[in-house]
Image (spheres, grey):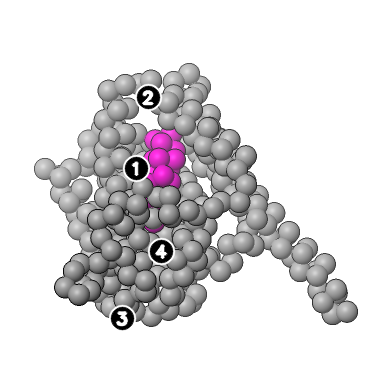
């Protein structure tokens, strides 16, 4: 009974957060300024850290059953949330390109991301449930997940500049066959009636591309967190907090994401490390504190290297511009 109450309580909390976001703070369409996005993003981070404390007490008192203690559970939640939050940065690259491809006005981007997040929560919840069931039934599936992450890391390392090709997206093709598409945006509407017939707007196509893109990212990120913890509640909640912060992080980082040139290589190393951890899980398990330190270290190196490179570029171009 307590387990059901905790799950239901968390889902209710998420619904309240989403209702406040869309129904109160962003009822009217407007351009999200960096300061506004930074405040909301900081609030989401603080909420995640506060929930991390709650995780400690939930597992220390064994309210969800099992033998996992509070300290270990709290470290697993924080490490899992850190992985999901860092991997979502790559998603921001792609979202920015999708909005640019469709020329989505800035004041309508928030509403599209909001509904994209709703879809992401549902899809990831289903994938987490399926992943948990597979791991419980088949121990060897952990090796499959590990291999998937290493292959993804290799693919990311070898790939050049990412491209967005919505016209080749299967969902977009199906939508265009089922409905006529308007040539212009109709404010924030996904559907409109033209000459008495239902039609879809480019905004709906944007939503379809974002949802399908997130599904591909989830295929990478969901196995990654199972390398840290097998607890469904920790897996789901850490994913949710990372997704809730994705919209705000986009508006904070989208304009400056190109400055972090070494962030993507650091994500490659994170995926590779997590993949190796999964392959060694049954024979040489790596403690969670070690993993947390490794992930923080890898991301820190990528961020610091990017900042040094950006400052060096500015110092080199500065004198030339002055001339």
In 3D space, how far apart are the residues under numbered discs 4 and 1 (Cα atoms)?
Answer: 20 Å
**Magenta-tinted stretch:** 210-227
Residue 171 drawn at (x, y percent): 33, 50
| Mark 1 or 2, closer to the camera | 2
Q: Residue at x 40, y 70 (%)?
A: 109
Disc on the earlier residue, 4 or 3: 3
Disc assigned to residue 28: 3
Residue on which the image places disc 4: 247
Residue on which the image places disc 1: 235
Depth check: give the residue in front, 46 or 140: 140
Residue 83 drawn at (x, y percent): 47, 46
Task: Indicate the quadrant where residue 158 lies.
Answer: top right
Residue 213 as seen in the image, left or right of residue 160: left
Q: Residue at x 31, y 37 (%)?
A: 231
In the rendered structure, are the residues bearing label 3 and label 1 in contact, judged by CB atoms less than 8 Å apart? no
Disc on the earlier residue, 3 or 1: 3
Disc on the earlier residue, 2 or 4: 2
Q: Say few, some or many: other residues with alpha carbon within 10 Å of mark 3 (under 14 / 14 to 19 / 20 or more).
A: few
Depth check: give the residue in front, 276 or 251: 251
In the rendered structure, are the residues bearing label 3 and label 2 in contact, judged by CB atoms less than 8 Å apart? no
Disc on the earlier residue, 4 or 1: 1
| Mark 3 or 2, closer to the camera | 3
Residue 3 drawn at (x, y percent): 17, 43
In 3D space, how far apart are the residues under numbered discs 4 and 3 (Cα atoms)?
Answer: 16 Å
In 3D space, how far apart are the residues under numbered discs 1 and 2 (Cα atoms)?
Answer: 17 Å
Q: Say few, some or many: other residues with alpha carbon within 10 Å of mark 2 (under 14 / 14 to 19 / 20 or more).
A: some
In 3D space, how far apart are the residues under numbered discs 3 and 1 (Cα atoms)?
Answer: 34 Å
Residue on which the image places disc 2: 141
Task: Indicate the quadrant where residue 258 lies.
Answer: bottom right
């Amino acid at each position: 009974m307590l387990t059901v109450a905790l799950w239901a309580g968390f889902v209710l909390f998420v619904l309240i957060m989403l209702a406040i976001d869309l129904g109160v703070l962003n009822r009217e369409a407007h351009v999200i300024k960096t300061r506004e996005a930074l405040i909301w993003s900081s609030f989401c981070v603080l909420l995640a850290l506060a929930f991390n404390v709650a995780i400690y007490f939930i597992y220390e008192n064994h309210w969800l059953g099992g033998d996992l203690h509070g300290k270990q559970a709290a470290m697993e939640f924080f490490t899992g949330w850190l992985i999901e939050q860092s991997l979502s940065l790559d998603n921001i690259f792609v979202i920015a390109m999708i909005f640019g491809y469709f020329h989505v006005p800035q004041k309508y981007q928030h509403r599209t991301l909001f509904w994209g997040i709703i879809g992401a929560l549902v899809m990831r919840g289903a994938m987490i449930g399926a992943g948990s069931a597979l791991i419980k039934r088949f121990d060897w599936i952990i090796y499959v997940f590990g291999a998937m992450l290493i292959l993804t890391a290799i693919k990311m390392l070898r790939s050049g500049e990412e491209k967005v090709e919505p016209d080749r997206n299967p969902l977009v093709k199906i939508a265009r066959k089922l409905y006529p598409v308007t040539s212009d945006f109709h404010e924030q509407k996904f559907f409109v009636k033209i000459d008495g017939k239902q039609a879809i707007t480019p905004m709906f196509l944007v939503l379809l591309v974002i949802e399908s893109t997130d599904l591909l990212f989830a295929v990478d990120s969901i196995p990654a967190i199972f390398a840290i913890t097998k607890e469904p509640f920790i897996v789901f909640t850490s994913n949710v907090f990372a997704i809730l912060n994705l919209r705000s992080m986009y508006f904070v980082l989208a304009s400056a994401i190109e400055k972090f040139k070494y962030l993507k290589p650091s994500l490659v190393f994170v995926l590779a490390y997590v993949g190796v951890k999964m392959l060694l899980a049954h024979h040489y398990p790596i403690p969670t504190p070690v993993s947390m330190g490794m992930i923080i270290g890898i991301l820190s190196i990528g961020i610091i290297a990017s900042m040094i490179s950006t400052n060096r570029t500015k110092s080199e171009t500065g004198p030339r511009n002055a001339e």
